[in-house]
Image (cartoon, rainbow, N blue to C red):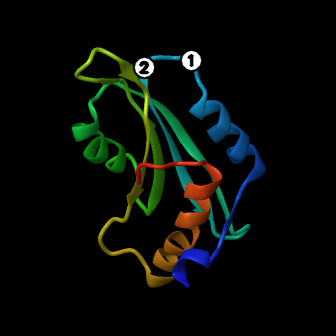
Amino acid sequence: QSESLVVCDVAEDLVEKLRKFRFRKETNNAAIIMKIDKDKQLVVLDEEHEVLLYPTKIIDSLVSLTSEKTFIVYSYKYQHEDGRVSYPLCFIFSSPVGCKPEQQMMYAGSKNKLVQTAELTKV
């Protein structure tokens, strides 16, 4: 049942931003940071960043930029053993200690909708 729960929808301009981010041509590591607008009950764009770190360092760096629960979509350069290069999108869900229960519910109930909307496979 929890997978079908939708507390907040995804803002239309964010849906378009995520689509463009998915098919971007740039080869740098980058991230889109999103948050919930509690009044509108929408997941909205918070910030965009060029990121010069590897995936193992990204969580601490991006999470330190935010003070509340956050959704992050991260694109990075991945070199395969056979020499191929790909740019996977990863979804990161940040939940700092001490968040209010109301806020935790809003983010937890909106996560699956955002993952589906952005067509993400690595969560």
- Residue 101 percent across, percent down from the top left: 45, 83
- Residue 29 percent across, percent down from the top left: 40, 26
Decide if residue 97 is on the left or right side of residue 74: left
Q: Which residue is mark 1?
A: 25
Outermost residue on the right side: it is 12
Given residues 87 and 12, the one toward you in this image is: 87
Q: Amino acid at mark 1?
A: Lys
Decide if residue 59 is on the left or right side of residue 106: left
Instruction: Find the distance from the CA under tag 2 to the CA under tag 1.
Output: 9 Å
Outermost residue on the front side: it is 82
Nearer mark to the viewer, of 2 and 1: 1
Please tell me which residue is depicted at 43% across the width and 79% down the height of the picture: 100
Label at residue 28: 2
Q: Tally the marks.
A: 2
Given residues 50 and 18, the one toward you in this image is: 18
- Residue 1 percent across, percent down from the top left: 56, 85
Q: Secondary structure at mark 1?
A: loop
Please tell me which residue is depicted at 52% across the width and 48% down the height of the picture: 120
Decide if residue 15 is on the left or right side of residue 48: right
Given residues 119 and 95, the one toward you in this image is: 119
On screen, 65 above or below 27?
A: below
Q: Quadrant of residue 16?
A: top right
Q: Amino acid at mark 2?
A: Asn
Q: Quadrant of residue 93?
A: bottom left
The quarter of the picture where the C terminus appears is: bottom left
Please tell me which residue is depicted at 28% across the width and 14% down the height of the picture: 83
